[in-house]
Image (tube, rainbow, N blue to C red):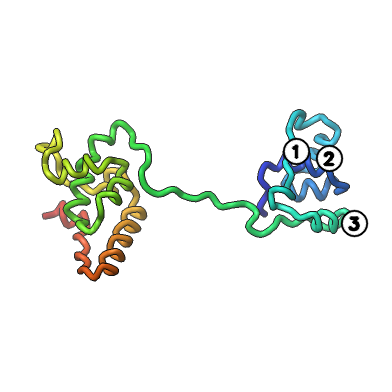
Amino acid sequence: MTLPLMPKATAVWLIEKTALTFTQIADFCGMHPLEVQAIADGEVAQGIVGYDPVANAQLTNAEIARCEKDSTARLRLLEGAIPMPKRSRGARYTPVAKRNDRPDGIAFLLRNYPQLTEAQIAKMMGTTKETIQKVRDRSHWNSANIKARDPVILGLCSQTDLNAMVQQANERLLREGQAVPPAPPPADAEEAA
């Protein structure tokens, strides 16, 4: 069962503003009825400000009124009341130990996925367009030691993110009427060769 946001604060508000039973509030907030009674007695949750579930689109006044009339009725959370967290894709924090591997990952992407734009590579690898250009031109300060290595294996990005970026780039090429380059061989085949 999905619980409301901030269940204790919601319970405080429901106790103060409604005539619902402790069992109804406990059911809705995912708490034990004795805990709700302790909140009502002031033994628990002192200082917690009530969180209005009606104003925050988790309940309606009609739903509260329906349950106040019938003590056996249970409150129902509105559909879509709790927003799903958005997973941010792209640049993330790269640990210091892996920062020296970034140019290797960039070289791999430039060689194996020429359809990716600099902006896509920068977002996925958490780097700048200037660094990408330096790796491409071999003017990077460490260009003599750069070896093209898979950024997924290096832990710089996930395979899902890489696949999504390549798919976007391929769709862009198709819209522009250009040919999509063939997929690179698997990493295992490169190491064996």
Q: Residues within 10 Å of mark 3 (few under 14, many from 20)?
A: few
Residue 64: where, in percent of width, then height?
82, 54
Q: Mark 1 is on which residue type? A: Gly
> What is the residue that sits farthest to the right in this orientation?
69
Q: Residue at x 82, y 35 (%)?
A: 38
Which residue lies under the disc numbered 3?
69
Tag count in the figure? 3
Q: Residues within 10 Å of mark 2 (few under 14, many from 20)?
A: few
Q: Tag 1, which secondary structure?
A: loop
CA distance for labels 3 and 1:
23 Å
Q: Say above or below: 36 vs 173.
A: above
Q: Mark 3 is on which residue type? A: Lys
Residue 16, numbered circle: 2
CA distance for labels 1 and 2:
8 Å
Residue 145: where, in percent of width, then height?
12, 37
Q: Do residues under tags 1 and 2 come within 8 Å of each other at their CB atoms?
A: yes
Q: Do residues under tags 3 and 2 come within 8 Å of each other at their CB atoms?
A: no
- Give whichever of discs 3 and 1 has the lower sequence position: 1
Which residue lies under the disc numbered 1?
50
Horizontal side of 93 relative to 132 (left or right) equals: right
Q: Residue at x 23, y 45 (%)?
A: 105
Which quadrant does the N terminus fall into? bottom right
